[in-house]
Amino acid sequence: MPATEESGDEALYVLTAVLLTPAQFPSVLGDDYPEACTALGLEPYETGYGLVLGQDGDGARWTVVTDDVSLVATAIATWDCGMEYALAIDDRTVIASLPGWPLAVAVAAPGIPAPHDPAPDPGLGEDISRAPLSPPNSERWGPAQRRLGADEIALQWAIWREQVDSEVTFVAPGEKPHGGVRRVLEEVRGYLDSPPPLGRIRSAFASGDARTLRADGPGWSMVARTDDIAFVLLDDAPGEVLPVGRGPELPDLLMALDKLAVRPL
């Protein structure tokens, strides 16, 4: 729900906002928190950032980075409850104003020109000199699409779980798992001995005492519930979702990963 944030003589019509923290960051930006920060030219401070996506008075797309994470988190929580919240950013908390949007936004501010990238203007400083941010191409499978697919499974777990035979096993008797899945499981186990960059393993609330786990690595993403199975997506298996049954090994692996994972505050 759009709101207006005044900044000096300029106004930003806020359309949405997201968190960029070790436990919650837009997956399209990277496999882990430092990688996501690098994509935006930011230092990966553990306290994180808020990303506010909006339009200026000419309709140009802007992503405003603020270090007031709690303010952005409050706005998101309020919007998620269906209530209005006028997100007003204090200029003193603004870290950068980046042209474009890194995510697809389906709405636009009323009464101003349609969303478009701002024209380059060296007089506005180095932020505008970079290419405008843009969402990934939805028609081409790659790391961003793989991570977005994993996001969707995490959000729609029950729907995806219903499509899998309840008897699926970790490794069927006499068989080996899919080659790509085997590689992922080996790399995930490696995280237990050598912890990966911050945000490669994340844990979020599920139902009951369970947690939803998310792990990413070079060319792969895994989504799991600590009381259930896992799903693996691979860069080299476009559009495929590969289930990994519990069997004798997965439960202990997931519990160990949960102990390493970062969690939302």
Image: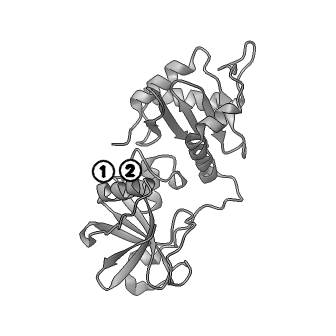
Which residue, given by chain and number where applicable, does mark 1 sit on? Answer: 47
As drawn, the residue found furthest toward the front would be 83
Q: Residue at x 50, y 19 (%)?
A: 252
Image side of residue 258 versus residue 186, left or right: left
Q: Give residue 181's quadrant in the image.
A: top right
- The amino acid beneath tag 1 is Thr
Using the image as rendered, state which of residue 109 and residue 91 is in the foreground. Answer: 109
Using the image as rendered, state which of residue 265 and residue 121 is in the foreground. Answer: 265
Q: Residue at x 43, y 26 (%)?
A: 209
Inspect this view and state whether residue 206 appears: yes
Q: Looking at the picture, how far across and down is residue 218, in whole percent?
A: 57, 43
User: How far, Cα to Cα, is label 1 from label 2?
Assistant: 7 Å
Q: Residue at x 71, y 59 (%)?
A: 139
Say the numbered circle drawn on residue 12.
Answer: none
Inspect this view and state whether residue 42 appears: no
Say the numbered circle drawn on residue 21.
Answer: 2
Assess whether mark 2 and mark 1 are in contact (beta carbons under 8 angstroms): yes
For residue 111, above or below residue 66: below
Number of other residues with Cα within 10 Å of mark 2, as a class: few under 14, some 14 to 19, many 20 or more: many
- The amino acid beneath tag 2 is Thr
For residue 128, above or below residue 89: below
For residue 9, above or below residue 229: below
Image side of residue 241 versus residue 56, left or right: right
Question: Which sits earlier in the primary sequence, circle 1 or circle 2?
Answer: 2
Q: Looking at the picture, how far across and down is residue 34, in whole percent?
A: 42, 50
Q: Give residue 135's quadrant in the image.
A: bottom right
Q: Residue at x 50, y 34 (%)?
A: 213
